[in-house]
């Protein structure tokens, strides 16, 4: 078996050592070390690696050459040799030089957090768009790994004009080949994105508000999506169970229809190349009228995870502080809580008008979440007078479906209505040129 990034395995799962570096001072991570190691192991299990051992390694600061200290590397080398470990997963970001040096010193394949997440995405992408996005991100990552690691990259090769110019090194050829493939992938992805934009344009003409589910990976977004829509989107208790966005129409208690969008889960230190590659997919979040931030309140790191979600949103150009009027928090997995923890969550949401305690798996609190969505979508309602031709049944139907008709006067040629309607829906109504 060969992975996305070329590490070959023996028959069966790859024997893997998971290392979580525990740094001090300004390098220290917010996450608790034990929880960080647990998440690192979950990432490794996501592509069915055989975890032989998990290790938290303390160090004052990353070393420029090996990241770890020389004594630590020597101990690891002996252990790797004894246990016949094939792969070392370092749950951090390694420079190309550090990765190369560690592989030489440990005599094993080394992969960092970015590389493993890209591998998971490569294994999970199902649609053509997802596959293209992951491949672009993987190639960008591989291009950054092109260093003079091996002698063949230091050789010069001449050319007759067809392949490689005079004195072009193998390193330059490898980089040019990757750039050529990236260019082709960008063109292919642009075609897919244009198709997505056409679909998005079609949805604007049938103007339903968009509600996007966002949250840390494994927070329960897909389970909530299935609960609300009756769909059968793949949901599992693992990181990045779903990658490709799914959209369904649902009816709120008021009868208003909205489009619900399930998106890829976020994670701490999500590779920038992936955020860039998946930007087209995540535009559903950028354009959403309401974002439902699904949080796993049973996780001790739920506050850190919320910060990671806001960090990714910030990379997408969404300032969480500025969009509080279009964000709701769904405090999920309360079925896993009891006693003081459950009382604390319930007391918190009672004090807020933008949060609901729910269990997506049992359905508890889901009706209250729908009611909150209804209220949020109506909070900017305006009362306006509109004149519509009697022959324009489509316009009247839109107003009855998306607004509240308070008064109506029927004439021979026109219908005059006083309607309470959301600012968003009124703008859509006028864009459709329905009003007379």
Image (cartoon, helix red, strand yellow):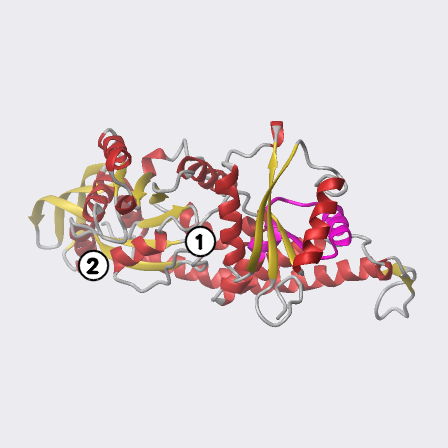
Q: Is residue 144 visible?
A: no
Does the segment drawn in magenta span residue 288?
no
Q: Position of residue 231 (x, y in %)?
A: 29, 63
Residue shown at the point (76%, 58%) measured from the top left? 175
Span shown in magenta: 91-118
Q: Which residue is mark 2?
A: 394
The N terminus, quarter of image:
bottom right
Does the segment drawn in magenta span residue 102?
yes
Front residue of 44 and 127: 44
Q: Position of residue 393 (x, y in %)?
A: 17, 59
Front residue of 342 and 321: 342
Which of pointers 1 and 2 lies earlier in the amino acid sequence? Answer: 1
Residue 264 - label: 1
Mark 1 or mark 2, whichever is nearer to me: 1
Q: Position of residue 347 (x, y in %)?
A: 23, 31
Q: Is residue 130 visible?
A: yes
Spatial distance from mark 1 to mark 2, Cα to Cα?
A: 36 Å
Q: In this view, which residue lies farthest toward the front?
A: 82
Q: Is label 1 in a helix, a strand or a loop?
A: loop
Q: Is label 2 in a helix, a strand or a loop?
A: helix
Residue shown at the point (88%, 63%) measured from the top left? 165
């Amino acid at each position: 078996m060969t992975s996305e990034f070329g590490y070959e395995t023996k028959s069966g799962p790859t024997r893997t050592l998971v290392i979580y570096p525990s740094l001090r001072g300004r390098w220290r991570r917010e996450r608790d070390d034990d929880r960080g190691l647990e998440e690192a192991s979950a990432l490794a299990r996501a592509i069915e690696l055989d975890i032989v051992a998990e290790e938290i390694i303390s160090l004052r600061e990353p070393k420029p050459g090996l990241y770890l200290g020389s004594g630590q590397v020597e101990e690891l080398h002996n252990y790797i040799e004894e246990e016949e470990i094939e792969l070392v997963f370092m749950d951090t970001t390694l420079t190309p030089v550090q990765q190369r040096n560690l592989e030489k010193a440990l005599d094993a394949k080394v992969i960092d957090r970015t590389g493993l997440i890209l591998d998971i995405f490569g294994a999970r992408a199902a649609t053509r768009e997802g596959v293209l996005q992951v491949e672009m991100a993987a190639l960008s990552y591989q291009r950054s790994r092109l260093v003079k690691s091996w002698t063949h990259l230091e050789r010069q090769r001449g050319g007759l004009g067809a392949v490689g110019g005079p004195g072009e090194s193998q390193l330059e050829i490898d980089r040019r080949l990757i750039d050529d493939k990236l260019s082709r992938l960008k063109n292919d992805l642009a075609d897919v994105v244009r198709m997505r934009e056409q679909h998005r344009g079609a949805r604007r003409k049938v103007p339903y508000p968009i509600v996007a589910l966002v949250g840390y990976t494994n927070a329960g977004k897909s389970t909530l999506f299935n609960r609300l829509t009756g769909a059968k989107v793949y949901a599992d208790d693992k990181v990045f169970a779903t990658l490709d966005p799914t959209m369904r129409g649902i009816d709120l208690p008021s009868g208003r229809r909205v489009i619900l969008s399930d998106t890829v889960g976020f994670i701490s230190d999500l590779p920038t190349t992936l955020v860039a590659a998946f930007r087209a997919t995540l535009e559903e979040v950028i354009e959403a009228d309401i974002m439902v931030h699904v949080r796993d309140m049973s996780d001790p790191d739920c506050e850190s995870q919320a910060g990671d979600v806001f960090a990714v949103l910030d990379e997408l150009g969404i300032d969480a502080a500025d969009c509080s009027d279009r964000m709701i928090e769904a405090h999920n997995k309360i079925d896993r809580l009891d006693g003081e923890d459950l009382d604390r969550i319930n007391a918190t949401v009672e004090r807020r008008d933008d949060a609901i305690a729910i269990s997506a798996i049992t359905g508890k609190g889901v009706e209250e979440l729908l009611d909150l969505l209804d209220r949020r979508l109506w909070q900017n309602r305006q009362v306006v007078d509109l004149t519509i031709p009697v022959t324009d049944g489509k316009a009247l139907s839109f107003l009855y479906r998306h607004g509240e008709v308070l008064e109506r006067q029927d004439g021979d040629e026109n219908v005059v209505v006083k309607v309470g309607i959301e600012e968003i829906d009124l703008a859509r109504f006028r864009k459709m040129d329905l009003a007379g």
